[in-house]
Amino acid sequence: MGIRIGSRVVCIDDSIKAGLNMEEFKKDFHTWVKAKEEYTIREIDDNDGLVVSVLLEEIRNPIRYFSTIGRAKESSFKIDRFREIEKATNKNVVNSKLEKV
């Protein structure tokens, strides 16, 4: 089945690519993931076929314009930075949506 909205995951890769412009990086990611920390998937995005990424319930980053996909969106995390630890159930998804209300 794989990772889906509501899945509980653990971060297995919190590395930041060497040579990045850290000033720009910090504009995109006010909050970064931490290895061995657990998170809940709130959204999955294929970024117009470029790379599959996720948004997390526990982290909110600013909306930014990305010229590579031609739209504004919240900065997200590449899905392969995570390993699923708990399968999403309808209850997980419903509770996740209720917390937003």
Image: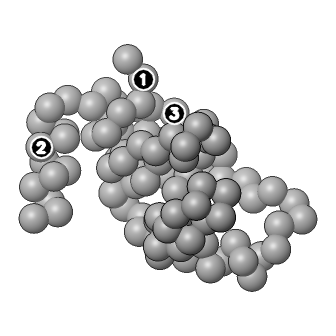
Marks 3 and 1, Cα distance to the nearest angstrom?
9 Å
Q: Which mark is residue 83?
A: 3
Q: How many neighbours does mark 3 have within 10 angstroms: few (below 14), some (14-19), or many (20 or more)?
A: some
Name the secondary structure under disc 2.
Answer: helix
Identify the residue position indicated by label 2 in the image. Answer: 94
Name the secondary structure under disc 1.
Answer: loop
Looking at the picture, the colour scheme in use is one colour
The amino acid type of the residue labelled 2 equals Val
Residue 80 percent coordinates (x, y): 60, 36
Residue farthest along the right direction in this orientation: 19
Residue 3 percent coordinates (x, y): 41, 30
The amino acid type of the residue labelled 3 equals Arg
Marks 2 and 3, Cα distance to the nearest angstrom?
22 Å
The amino acid type of the residue labelled 1 equals Gly
Residue 7, can we see it? yes
Is residue 100 found left or right of 30 in the rendered image? left
Quarter of the image where one finds residue 5: top left
Kindly identify the residue that appears in the image at 83 percent across and 67 percent down.
20
Q: Are marks 2 and 3 in contact (CB under 8 Å)?
A: no
Kindly identify the residue that appears in the image at 73 percent across and 54 percent down.
15
Kindly identify the residue that appears in the image at 42 percent across and 43 percent down.
44
Q: Which mark is residue 2?
A: 1
